[in-house]
Image (cartoon, grey):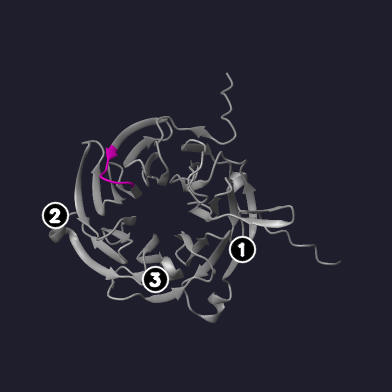
Amino acid sequence: MTSAVPPAPGRELSSPPSDGISNLRFSNHSDHLLVSSWDKTVRLYDASANVLRGEFLHGGAVLDCCFHDDSSGFSASTDNSVRRLVFNAGKEDILGKHDAPVRCVEYSYAAGQVITGSWDKTLKCWDPRGASGQDRTLVGTYPQPERVYSLSLVGNRLVVATAGRHVNIYDLRNMSQPEQRRESSLKYQTRCVRCYPNGTGYALSSVEGRVAMEFFDLSEASQAKKYAFKCHRKSEAGRDIVYPVNAIAFHPIYGTFATGGCDGFVNVWDGNNKKRLYQYSKYPTSIAALSFSRDGRLLAVASSYTFEEGDKPHEPDAIFVRSVNEIEVKPKPKVYPNPPA
């Protein structure tokens, strides 16, 4: 018996959010997928079985979500709250609040803490083991130069990207001040920052169709390796049309990465060899978020208009889960010319 070949974009998940998708993330332990949306929900799916396992309604739009373990997670909302969600019990509690919408949430396995970034221009660290209630759970508040737009963690390193093109790099073991204060090497507003899985640096994308590849080590040799490249743009009648790059996701095995843009395309890149490996066929609308599963076999794609051209009729918000073929993500070996005889 031959199994049906899934359509080109991947399998579409049933019961998608009813408004824009702000983020989606695979679990580190299974093919469970957590999805946050402007429709005020966080949804938990079993991506392999295509089943909606749970749904949590918030007091405002949900701008980010992340897993704690396979049975619980955290969310960041425009109602200024940071919530812990316990999936199997269907219950939630509020870890605490910011003074403005919470844009980003990450869980650090290294520190055992939840880290949130807000438009109130602060970063907060929370201990989720504390009983519910802000006084007992808040570990610290750290002022940022501007509104927080994106966060990423690798080991004990935390990268914070804010408005005004600032980038702060912290060591979670000493949050009193940033280890490094940087400015984005891209001229336009930052959209997304993601650390390399090997911990040596981060990729940062902007609203102007570019990605910068950066390194933590400040030595001349390391800094000489940094570069930026153009992507998610097209030429039409002699003019360049440039799209925001909303999403970056690293492949957990190969360290290659996917980018998603407002052009509806997902591209896969080999950062070390400065090559594009693959471009998937176009999705119905903007790519709002991307996530590889823990083993890199699945890629979740949020096809969801991000209002970059204002309110206009658009395709429905959808989540596609595609099986990843090794040829799409594995770096190609370098071919060296034969030395002359």
Where residue 209 appears, x then y in whole percent? 58, 58
- The residue beneath circle 3 is 169
Query: Left or right: 194 with respect to 229?
Result: left
The magenta stretch is 56-61
The amino acid marked with disc number 3 is: Ile
Query: Taken as a whole, is the magenta stretch helix, strand or loop?
Result: loop
At x 35%, y 65%, the residue is 156
Image quadrant occupied by the N terminus: top right
Q: Which mark is residue 229?
A: 1
- The residue beneath circle 2 is 133
Q: Quadrant of residue 24?
A: top left
Which sits in the foreground, 144 or 151?
A: 144
Counting residues from the start of the chain, the first of labels 3 and 1 encountered is 3
The amino acid marked with disc number 2 is: Gly
Residue 291 vertical placement versus 87 (above, below) = below
Image quadrant occupied by the C terminus: bottom right
Q: Which mark is residue 306?
A: none
Query: Left or right: 261 with respect to 74?
Result: right
